[in-house]
Image: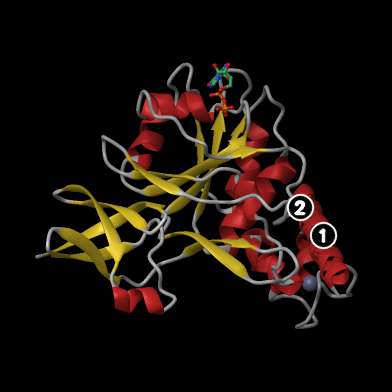
Amino acid sequence: MSRTGLVLAREGSQFRVDTEDGIVTAVLRGRIKRDDSRALVGDRVTLEQSGGDWAIATVAERTNLLERRIPGGRGTRPIAANLDQIFVMTAAADPEPIPQLLDRLLVLAESNDIPAAVIVNKIDRASGEGLIKRFEQVGYPVFPISVTTGAGLAPLLATLHSEVSLVTGASGVGKSSLLNVLQPGLTLRTGVVSQKEGRGRHTTVTAEMLPLDGGGYLVDTPGFSDVGFWGLEPRGLVQCFPDLQRHAEECRFPDCTHRTEPGCGVRAAVGTGVAEDRYQSFLTFLDELNTELRDWE
Ligand code: GDP
Ligand code: ZN
């Protein structure tokens, strides 16, 4: 007997797998255990049953991989696979939005090749107009909402019910409130992002996939920001800023770092196609990545 399913969680050597006939527990079949395509949360798998026990027989090719980069350039550790979208959530006010923190979370999504979108909550408190424009200019889908009044919620909830999503953002922006509207009683460890940087911390990052009653899945992983972009090639950073990347082809030098070189297309676009503070975020992260490289050498 065989079935297909989606890996929801791992507990030791046991995997919890969602199938069309309900949730089952499975172990890895011997052959899979030996190669490195170990099953991950989010993996689409085929299961085979022998003697009443389910075993994961195959793991489908992944569309993307959320990875934690290990400090010191010692590689990466996979956390979850096949995320459709990461929602970076902020409030229009209370707490005051921190654009650079949002940029950091967006770079994390980009560096893992996961599509990102921005939720601007509490539009009953402030219009959020500047923020909305800032991220729309980059090209991100933006969902202006108020969990309190219900404004703008319908399209966001419809999206969450049709995808595998991760919601992250600073504490106080309204994540729990949103999840409670999405599915009352749902509790997550997700995305409590500390305003201090997680650099150098060695927290254990695991993930779990929560099926939603109305369809879709939420990925729950504590301290998403701790995933870190350690180990990202400084030269690759510009590709994690779609607005800057659009102008990088106009640079005179192919190895332009977009800092001081003459004829830099990115710098030329600052103030027009590229917001001043987006470019500042880029410079800040670039310094961090370069400092890390030096620290490790
Ligand atoms: P979390 O830390 O991100 O999970 O944020 P919470 O969901 O706990 O929300 C923090 C506070 O913001 C709570 O007091 C909520 O009632 C409040 N809140 C959440 N959404 C809104 C909103 O759309 N408008 C307003 N005015 N307050 C909100
Ligand atoms: Zn340049």
Separation of marks 1 and 2 at Cα, in angstroms: 10 Å
Marked residue nearer the N-terminal end (1 or 2): 2
Q: What is the x, y in percent for residue 24?
A: 22, 50
Task: Please state the horizontal and vertical placement of residue 195, each as a whole percent of the image.
Answer: 74, 37
Quadrant location, the N terminus: bottom left
The disc at residue 256 is none
Q: Check if mark 1's residue and mark 2's residue have beta carbons within 8 Å.
A: yes
Assess disc 1: are there few (<14), some (14-19) or many (≥20) residues with their C-alpha within 10 Å of its C-alpha.
Answer: some
Badge nearest the viewer, 1 or 2: 2
Q: Quadrant of residue 46?
A: bottom left
The residue nearer to you, when weighing 17 against 44, is 17
Question: How does the figure colour the protein chain or chains?
Answer: secondary structure
Secondary element at tag 2 = loop
Taking 19 as reference, is 27 above or below it? Answer: below
Q: Of the residues shown, which amino acid type is indicated by label 1?
A: Glu
- When asked about the image quadrant of residue 172, the answer is top right
> On the rendered image, what quadrant is the C terminus found in?
bottom right
Q: Position of residue 265 (x, y in %)?
A: 77, 70
Q: Nearer the viewer, residue 211 or 71?
A: 71
Q: Nearer the viewer, residue 140 or 169?
A: 169
- The residue lying at 86 percent from left, 64 percent from top is 291
Relative horizontal placement of residue 231, taking residue 210 as reference (left or right): right
169 in relation to 209, above or below: above
Q: Residue furthest front?
A: 51
Q: Which residue, given by chain and number where applicable, does mark 1 sit on? A: 288
Q: Residue at label 2? A: 199
Quarter of the rendered structure image containing ligand 1: top right
Element marked by disc 1: helix
Name the residue located 62 percent from the left edge and 50 percent from the top edge.
Answer: 137
